[in-house]
Image (tube, rainbow, N blue to C red):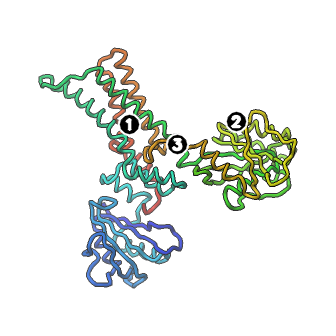
Amino acid sequence: MDVIAAISTANALSAIGIVRVSGEGCFAICDKVFQPDKGGLFSDARPREMVLGRLLDRERRAIDSCLAVRFPGPGSYTGEDCAELHCHGSPVVLGEALEALFAAGARQAGRGEFTQRAFLSGRMDLTQAEAVIDLIESETAQAARNAVEQLGGALRRKIEPVYDRLLDLTSQFYAVVDYPDEDIEDLRREDMLRMLRSAEETLGALLATFRRGKILRQGVPAAILGRPNVGKSSLLNALLGYDRAIVTDVAGTTRDTVEEKAVVGGVLLRLIDTAGIRDTGDAVERLGVERARSAAAEAELALLVLDGSRPLTDEDRAAARAARTAPHVIVIRNKSDLPQSPAFALPEGTGSALAVSAREGTGLAELEEAVAALFPAGEVPPGQVLTNARQAEAVERAVSALRGAGEALENGLTPDAALSDAERALAALGELTGRTLREDLVARIFERFCVGK
């Protein structure tokens, strides 16, 4: 493969910036852009040992004092010769370094090309490769823990025993058929059925983690609902920790949905601040109210905000009806810092409410506890959670194939009738880890990645 290079750190001012190079001949290319202070060539430096020197531009003029390190293959990240230049984090310096590498014979790396080479060289399977971008994009500690465990092979280790048992089953069947004169133990229906059901149970439990995986990666869609002026936008600002939404005493200030992410109780919420639900003659506000109802219907969680300083109104009841279209509802009695109305009552069917003052920031800890209770981390070990639709779809196909194989045996069909389903399950699991995968699918997977990783 040709030599690729890319800036692996953010395109912004920073203390340190890293340029990564990989491919056969990359050390010779680095010799043209890096000059060790102690003399000699970078390509002769000891592996995995930082070397201080000068970074040279394409005209071999010094542009930085930096550190360089080389990682000979196959024990490198990509499985081939790799090098890194650790420079001062000036975008100008990093750009000049990259241009010098291009002039010396390297080319710009594509999105995810370093990790793709690691996958193709066998340094990691596909679940580990996908964990790299999951780790980069993680927005909660739980998501980061799951990603780093997958990067260490936790998901592969969960799947491999099932794959190996299915491989043993199919290979034994073909051995019996192809070599009838050999003393090979025939397959017993009971043993086959027991193995297929065990594999189906293991993969079924894995498939059930996908909902949790989506929450880890994407967050919980959470609509903030209520009539005008109950403090919905103030609650959004309080949860975010800064003023994102405009807050005024004028009813109907929020006329469209405002979406932001916040970690509440350790759970990533995709918060949607909505227009106050009420009947209005204003065409623009009416459209906002309809969007509020739509947001509630599509949300996983509704935060129903009520004004505890005022009596319950028909508009509050309408907001409560909209909130109940979501699977989960938390009722918030806002403005607890004001004198509470003796006529205040909860809408029918909403249960208890949390006392909160969005303006003062009180009661938010109790709200965080309520969110955490609704979306617990669960007992699934980190790393054994499916985090994307590709993974879930492959496991689902494997489970379906195993179920079909088991049903064939239970219905009295011969083992060869179940074999094709077992092979379909094998193919699906192979696709999950990357043992059997089309080139176009590989390319599509790595399009998610950033350049330099």
Q: Secondary structure at mark 1?
A: helix
Q: Residues within 10 Å of mark 2 (few under 14, many from 20)?
A: some
Res 428 label: 1
Instruction: Name the amino acid type tagged 1.
Output: Ala
Q: Nearer the viewer, residue 164 or 349?
A: 349
**Residue drawn at the location 34% of the way across and 56% of the way down:** 118
Q: Quadrant of residue 417?
A: top left
Residue 8 drawn at (x, y percent): 44, 66
Real-space Cα distance between discs 2 and 1?
A: 36 Å
Residue 85 appears in the rendering = yes
**Residue drawn at the location 80% of the way across and 43% of the way down:** 277
Q: Secondary structure at mark 2?
A: loop
Disc on the earlier residue, 1 or 3: 3
Residue 292 drawn at (x, y percent): 74, 44
Residue 291 appears in the rendering = no
Q: Which residue does the numbered mark 2 point to in the structure image? A: 325
Q: Secondary structure at mark 3?
A: helix
Residue 357 drawn at (x, y percent): 76, 54
Instruction: Name the amino acid type tagged 3.
Output: Arg
Q: From the viewer's perspective, is residue 413 above or below residue 401?
A: above
